[in-house]
Image: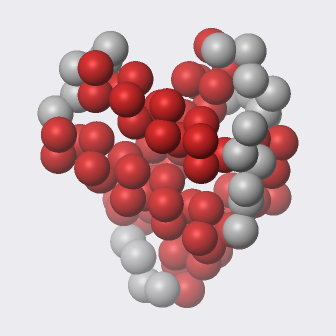
Amino acid sequence: MELSQHISSFEKYIANQEGLSPSTVKSYMFFLSRFTSLTKVSTTEGITLAAIEKLKNALLEKGVGKRTINTHLASLRTLIRYLNKNDIKTIPV
C-alpha cells in the first residue's frame, strides 16, 4: 500500500478515533503532504532518518522557523506511531 493511502487512513483515524478538531486534522494533513512532496517518499519504508533530515533541511532552506519544523516533526511522529500500532513496516518512533 502506498504511503498516501496510509495517510488517508490516518486522517480518518485522527478525526474519528482520536477526536482531533478539524483544524488540527487539516494541519496534520498539510504537514504530511509537505513531507511527501519535499522528500518524494511514497512508501512507509521510505520514512527514514535520512528522509526526516531532508525534510528539516528543506524547511530550513525555505526559511521555516524551528517551531513550525517541530510541528511538522510532531505530525510525522504521530503518523509513525499510528503505522507502528497497526503493524505497518516503518521506522520506530
Q: Residue at x 48, y 86 (%)?
A: 62
Q: Residue at x 71, y 68 (%)?
A: 40
Q: Relative to 89, is 2 on the left or the right?
A: left
Q: Residue at x 57, y 61 (%)?
A: 35
Looking at the picture, does residue 12 appear above or below residue 19?
below
Residue 64 point in image, percent of width and height: 41, 76
Q: Relative to 44, is 19 on the left or the right?
A: left
**Residue 63 in sight here:** yes
Q: Quadrant of the C terminus?
A: top right
Considering depth in this image, is 5 or 49 the residue closer to the camera? 5
Looking at the picture, does residue 14 appear above or below residue 86?
below
Considering depth in this image, is 48 or 68 the residue closer to the camera? 48
Q: Quadrant of the N terminus?
A: top right
Considering depth in this image, is 91 or 37 the residue closer to the camera? 37
Report the number of numbered marks: 0
Residue 80 point in image, percent of width and height: 62, 32
Residue 85 point in image, percent of width and height: 62, 13
Q: How is the image coloured?
A: secondary structure
**Residue 78 in sight here:** no
Considering depth in this image, is 67 or 37 the residue closer to the camera? 37
Residue 44 point in image, percent of width and height: 75, 41
Q: Relative to 68, is 89 on the left or the right?
A: right
Q: Residue at x 16, y 33 (%)?
A: 21
Looking at the picture, does residue 14 appear above or below residue 77?
above
